[in-house]
Amino acid sequence: MTTRKYLTFGEGAASADAGRRPIVRVVGVGGAGCNIVDRLAGSGLPHVEAVAVNTDAQNLVGLRCRKILIGKTTTGGRGAAGVPETGEAAAGSDLERIGGALKGTEVLFLLSGLGGGTGTGASPVIARAAREAGALVVALTVHPFRAEGRTRNLAARVGLERLRDEADVVVVVHNDKLVRDFPHMNFPDALKVADHLLLHPVRSITQLLTREDLPNLRKVLQIRDIALLGFGESSVHLGPRSVIRDAVDSLMPEGDISGHDRALAVIHCPPGYGEDELHRFIRELHLFIHLDAQIMWGPIADPALKDEVRIMTIVGRARERPGGPAGPATVVEPLPDGHGPEI
């Protein structure tokens, strides 16, 4: 029988000295990505640099992070007008400046909204450059509502395919699924929830991550495909299975995780939560995914939690490159008819 693979985080950023922390940057691309990064910068995340990249100079004004205006000679700072090719060209024309801002990055969280011009077109270019420079690239994206139209949804589909070829792992939050899960939620609130869902993995992972953890993190997240994002919450009295079941039910988008072979799990628990219970979490997660899956995990003690325990998990399967067996299919819904900018 194959031994189950448990890959644990190190002591965590809270107790690690500066020399043990990897260089982590969070880059927002395009209007949606920049807005998400600004929220992160405003709330504060120690030891993580936030960077906003956009073709729209006006959008960068007032953001609380480092800002890079790209494609100034081609767009005049007026945005990409919803054309991904314009966003791609803008990133290509300023790739040297982008590379300078990301120099030394070991883990890059790339945040963007799909379907527009800059986020859709520039994100794959930045992902490729960062990965080729040695960074682990985790792309976190928002897929537009179907009601936003055929053109925007088609652009999102094409952009997603390009991004999954360039990033090490891609996580997608579908706005339509949020509305289905919460039918009384309006569009603006759905966008806020999507932002929160994308920032949650950034916060959870960086809270625990040390440089010694990087090889294991690469092993788990270097899948070159789309992964599923899940969250679970339950009472400590109901046990780990209840929390894992809740996380599986919330996967973004819906998917069958049986047979997937890699997972990252961060367990938020009350201080003093027993180590035996933590290991039960991972055993339960193995049962839902695969008995021989590689699972990297770590706990975060949260004094605000009294009788609750929560889990954030990213579940994936390594994508075979051309010529090998097919990897998991991309989940795509049918299209409907019908400081100032850095100069």
Image (cartoon, rainbow, N blue to C red):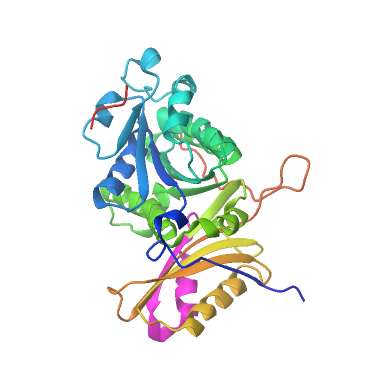
Q: Position of residue 160 (x, y in %)?
A: 53, 38
Name the residue: 27% across, 31% down.
60
Residue 263 appears in the rendering:
yes
Residue 116 appears in the rendering:
no
Drawn side of residue 87 relative to residue 294, left or right = left
Q: Can you say whether 136 is above or below 61 in the image?
A: below
Residue 83, image quadrant: top left
Name the residue: 36% across, 44% down.
49
Q: Quadrant of the N terminus?
A: bottom right
119 and 168: which one is in front?
168
Name the residue: 45% across, 74% down.
243
Q: Position of residue 340 (x, y in %)?
A: 24, 28
Provide the residue span drawn in magenta: 230-253
Q: Can you say whether 106 is above or below 182 in the image?
A: above
Drawn side of residue 194 relative to residue 333, left or right = left
192 and 130: which one is in front?
130
Count the labels in the image.
0
Q: Position of residue 198 (x, y in %)?
A: 40, 51
Q: Can you say whether 14 is above or below 77 in the image?
A: below
1 and 44: which one is in front?
44
The residue lying furthest to the left in this view is 62
Q: Quadrant of the C terminus?
A: top left
Q: Position of residue 202 (x, y in %)?
A: 41, 53
Residue 205, image quadrant: bottom left
Please tell me whether residue 195 belongs to the stretch shown in magenta.
no
Name the residue: 65% across, 51% down.
328
